[in-house]
Amino acid sequence: MPIRPHPKSPDAPDVPDVPESLDAHEAHDAPNAPPDRTRLTTTPSPSPPLTPPRSSPAALLAPYRTLFSRPGTRAFTLGNLMARLPSGMFGVSAVIMIAGARGSYALAGAVTATGLAATAVAGPWTARLVDRYGQARVAVPAALGSLALLLCVRFDAPDWTLFAAYAATATTPNTGGMSRARWRHLFREDPAAVHTANSFEQAADELCFMLGPVLAAFLCGSLFPEAGTLVAAVLLAAGVLVFAAQRATEPPPAGAGARGRSPLRSRGMPMLLLTLAATGAVFGAMEVVTLAYADARGHRSVAGVILALQAAGSCAAGLTYGALRTAAKGPAGRRLPWCLLAMTGLMTLPGLSAWASGSLVLLAAALLCAGTGTAPTMVTAMTLVQRRSPEGRLNEGMSLAVTALLTGIAAGSATGGSVVEHLSPRTGYVVPAGAAALALLLGLLTRPRRHPHPSSPPSVPPPPAP
């Protein structure tokens, strides 16, 4: 900083100028320095605030601190996580409970498949009611249906009641979709914050589906067969109550406005849902094939741990992707094909490891790496679903996305199981890789064609010169 002498007053004695190259201390010790009363002083410039490097943990957590600084966000997130953990518990708990009480895994599988199909059909209708009447008015009564199956098994009701009772769980609200709708409402003017929120929600999905089956199996095995379903029902009811109590963050109900155009009629939405169905097939096929492969190697008990590593990789990738604000720049429709391309490449790793060595350790590492490709794809796809859902139909659009995923999971599980049974577990890894390639092909078609804006006047050529 250049040093300049104090301006002279008319009565001040003449003082020789000090070269600008001297700082304050050099000027005082220099020959012919001014007396003390005119000693040169400088005001130190304030040092810039210390900012952590972009790659540091503090910088990665900064976007999430911004999210949870809003009043009410921590409370509804706590309720949301409590209500979502049972989504990873109900399937395993129901199989263990029904098989233990009735002695038939075939009956248990048929009942859970019926519940999955009912959820795919009834989910969008429940979400439409949420859009029309509000989250609190619909979610709380709908959460009570999860107790019906437990009561039927406990009191030895006929088998047909198990199908009806588990089908009643289809009314269970999609708290993940409702939570994303809240973030979208709170940060509607900040696309980067919405991107971070979607990434957090995807990481929460992975965490719940990673911990849910483990917790359910532990409760059913260490306590009694109905313990997993009972704890899941209690967590669901308590979580929905906590979530619904945060009325300040709830989006206003659309009322009659929710009766407008269906999300299925939005431009680009049908192809996007097909892309999500193909992505769901990746998840379903990978789970069945990995279970069969571990069983064929004589280590069936570690299959759950190996699959948990895939979910852990996806969870870590989702949180990192959400912290990168640069990932939110640009249209999501352009980012989706790149995410699908990365996922397709990573999904070839488990099959390569199975054919190369047959080591379960190498397979676990391959699944950990493969999991990092799913979260960015899901985050970007869900962002597109939100943007393409009509006003007042956001929950319905999110529910349609979940339905597409469930349909794909069921199809992938069936296809993967068939390939494993008729060919080999190693060959089965072709199914998730092929489903990822199909998702990439469909993703290239999700971007709607550009049309001229209806308000822009048609271009008219200038009149010829006279």
Image (cartoon, rainbow, N blue to C red):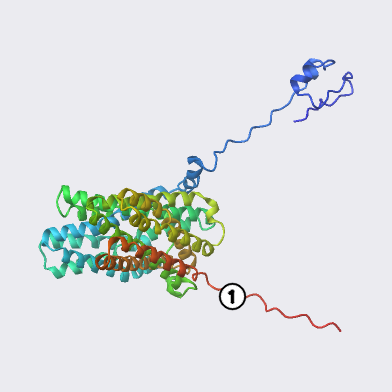
Rendering quarter of residue 283 = bottom left
Q: Position of residue 129 (x, y in %)?
A: 36, 68
Which residue: 23% across, 60% down? 146
Q: Position of residue 25 (x, y in %)?
A: 74, 19
Please name whichever residue, 141 or 81, is drawn nearer the observer in this view of the structure: 81
Asked which secondary structure carries label 1, the reply is loop
Please name whichever residue, 291 or 142, is drawn nearer the observer in this view of the structure: 291
Residue 295 visible in the displayed image: yes
Q: Quadrant of the N terminus?
A: top right
Vertical side of 466 occupied by 144: above or below: above
For badge 1, the amino acid type reads: His
Residue at numbered disc 1: 451
Q: Quadrant of the C terminus?
A: bottom right
**267 lies left or right of 82:** right
Which residue: 69% across, 28% down? 44
Please name whichever residue, 299 or 240, is drawn nearer the observer in this view of the structure: 299
Vertical side of 354 occupied by 54: above or below: above
Please name whichever residue, 27 or 70, is drawn nearer the observer in this view of the structure: 27
Vertical side of 261 occupied by 398: above or below: above
